[in-house]
Amino acid sequence: MPERLLAPEGAAASVTEFTYGGATLVAEDLGSGPHPYVLIHGIGMGRSVYVDLVERLPGRVIGLDLPGFGEAPEPERTLTMARHADLIAAFLRGRDISDAVLIGHSMGSQIAAELASRHPQLVDGIVLAGPTVNSAARSVWEQARYLLIDLIGERPTVILRGAREYLRGGPHLIRKIRATVVHEPEKAYAKVQCPVLVLRGEDDPLAPQSWCREIVSLIPGRAEMHEIPDHGHGTLISHAEPAAKLITEFTASL
């Protein structure tokens, strides 16, 4: 059975598996209140790497392990970003959630955009943190190169947590990365109707400032961008207080 990885000792939380369309995710649900945060991790990650962020967010937080990542079992075939979005949407409907604030990090930003565009009735706002994939560098090797550049300057906590989760990602990781790279998130951004917060670490090579500004310009409604000083791509993983503050303020304005 999946374990509690995010909830502090003594806190009320539930950890469950949810299966839809032949794929299974793991969800850890803790806290209470409106606008529950639904945390969608990046490629090769899992919910456990965001424990610092979760500790700083008020209210209800639902951390996910997507199929084939973290504690979730490997799916029979690799999911597209759209299929990931439909799986999470089915999960939210099963929990009677229709006011979610999606926090998508890296690959999770692409899934969050798909979910908000395909199932707008479930989402009140989305946070795109370190959004990928930059339209000017849409290849597996370009993204791998940027990731290596980012890791050189990252904090040890980010490297250690990330390395552990990448090893858990299994032998199909390259195939999963390819599914991320071929996705064109700009098509989803143009259909997002809810408010959007774009976050990037000022030293993040995977989410360059030009790309983040392009995302803001593509959103039809309210969208804003903030840079977090002295952070790279792991801005939600280590020293997450600046990101948590911006996310909390954004949610309070919905």
Image (spheres, rainbow, N blue to C red):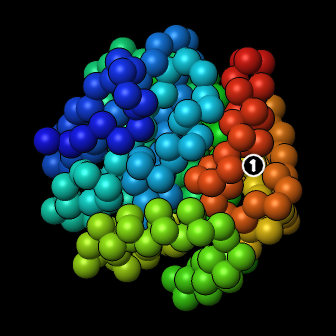
Asked if one can make out residue 213 in the rendered structure from this viewpoint, the answer is no
Number of numbered discs present?
Answer: 1
Q: Residue 168, relative to residue 192: is it above or below? A: below
- The percent position of residue 198, horizontal first and vertical second, equals 75, 46
Whether residue 68 sits left or right of residue 88 in the image: it is left
Q: Residue 130, relative to residue 117: is it above or below? A: below
* Most foreground residue, 154 or 102: 154
Judged from this view, the residue extending furthest toward the front is 9
Please give the name of the residue rendered at 38% of the width and 59% of the height, measured from the top-left corner: 80
Whether residue 197 sits left or right of residue 56 in the image: it is right
- The percent position of residue 57, horizontal first and vertical second, equals 61, 29
- The percent position of residue 13, horizontal first and vertical second, equals 33, 23
As helix, strand or loop, the secondary structure at mark 1 comes to strand
Asked if one can make out residue 241 in the rendered structure from this viewpoint, the answer is yes
Judged from this view, the residue extending furthest toward the top is 33
Disc 1: CA contacts within 10 A as few (<14), some (14-19) or many (>=20): many
Quadrant housing the C terminus: top right
Please give the name of the residue rendered at 65% of the width and 67% of the height, measured from the top-left corner: 155
**Amino acid type of disc 1?**
Leu
Quadrant housing the N terminus: top left
* Most foreground residue, 203 or 6: 6
Please give the name of the residue rendered at 67% of the width and 81% of the height, measured from the top-left corner: 152
* Most foreground residue, 11 or 235: 11
Q: Which residue is mark 1?
A: 199
Residue 151 image-quadrant placement: bottom right
- The percent position of residue 20, horizontal first and vertical second, equals 21, 40
Please give the name of the residue rendered at 45% of the width and 18% of the height, measured from the top-left corner: 31
